[in-house]
Image (spheres, grey):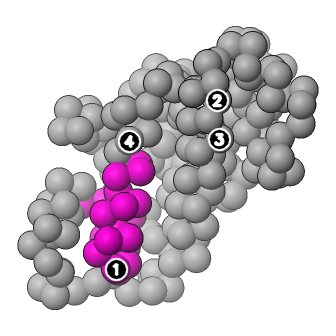
Amino acid sequence: MPRIPYPDESKMSEDIRAHLGEIPANVTRMMAVASEPVFKGVSQIGSAFIGGSDLPAKLREIAILRVGYISKAEYETFQHEALGRFVGLTDEQIDAVRAGDTGAAALNEVERAVLEFVDDVVLNVRASDATLAGVRKHLTDAQVVDLILVSGAYMMISRFLETTGVELDADPIDWDAFTKSQ
């Protein structure tokens, strides 16, 4: 049972109802409780990371999953494990991310650097010079900034999910259909 009730769809604007029709997941339903400009803005942020960022999809999903695991956000990891697999992460890589295992053989050098960097940003707020240099060795400055922002955005989403009590969906989002619609 959610801690804040899902909204009454009959009281939503046509724009919000149309958006819910595209992505009927519980996270979207709960987000529709927010004011309409906030709902639209947060939705645009997520879409920008998934459909427009220069940060490679696998690295984005490593970051999102790690944030979700650190935040103990079950809904977040449920949905993004499926998206991670969709973009090519293996179960071994997902297990390494869950464990925070920066030495895992399943991860390559850049994936390890991203995992270490995300841990540093989430746990310490300001990444150390060493972890920043570690990701800058592999990523452009724009990709590093996107990595910082995606980590922060999904910290926000994880806290939203856990505090409002968003329930797990019966199945993960159909990421193939979602990415084609973006």
Q: Residues within 10 Å of mark 1 (few under 14, many from 20)?
A: few
The numbered mark, 3 or 1, whose residue comes first in the sequence reads: 1
Q: Does 129 appear above or below 43?
A: above
Residue 166 appears in view: yes
Query: Given the image, on which type of amino acid does mark 4 rest?
Result: Ala
Give the distance between the C-alpha atoms of the residues marked 3 and 1, in whole angstroms. 26 Å
Q: Which residue is mark 3?
A: 148
Q: Which residue is mark 4?
A: 48
Magenta stretch: residue 28 in it? yes
* Label placed on residue 144: 2
Q: Position of residue 57 (x, y in %)?
A: 47, 26
Residue 99 appears in view: no
Give the distance between the C-alpha atoms of the residues marked 3 and 4, in whole angstroms. 14 Å
Q: Position of residue 10 (x, y in %)?
A: 12, 85
Q: Which residue is mark 1?
A: 35
Q: Secondary structure at mark 2?
A: helix
Residue 94, picture quadrant: top right
Are discs 3 and 1 less than 8 Å apart at CB?
no
Are discs 1 and 2 less than 8 Å apart at CB?
no
Q: What range is drawn magenta here?
A: 24-46
Q: Secondary structure at mark 1?
A: loop
The numbered mark, 3 or 4, whose residue comes first in the sequence reads: 4
Q: Main secondary structure of the magenta part?
A: helix
Give the distance between the C-alpha atoms of the residues marked 1 and 4, in whole angstroms. 20 Å
Residue 127, picture quadrant: top right
Q: Does 166 appear above or below 125?
A: below
Q: Residue at x 51, y 78 (%)?
A: 164
Q: Residues within 10 Å of mark 3 (few under 14, many from 20)?
A: some
Query: Given the image, on which type of amino acid does mark 3 rest?
Result: Ile
Q: Is residue 58 left or right of residue 47?
A: right
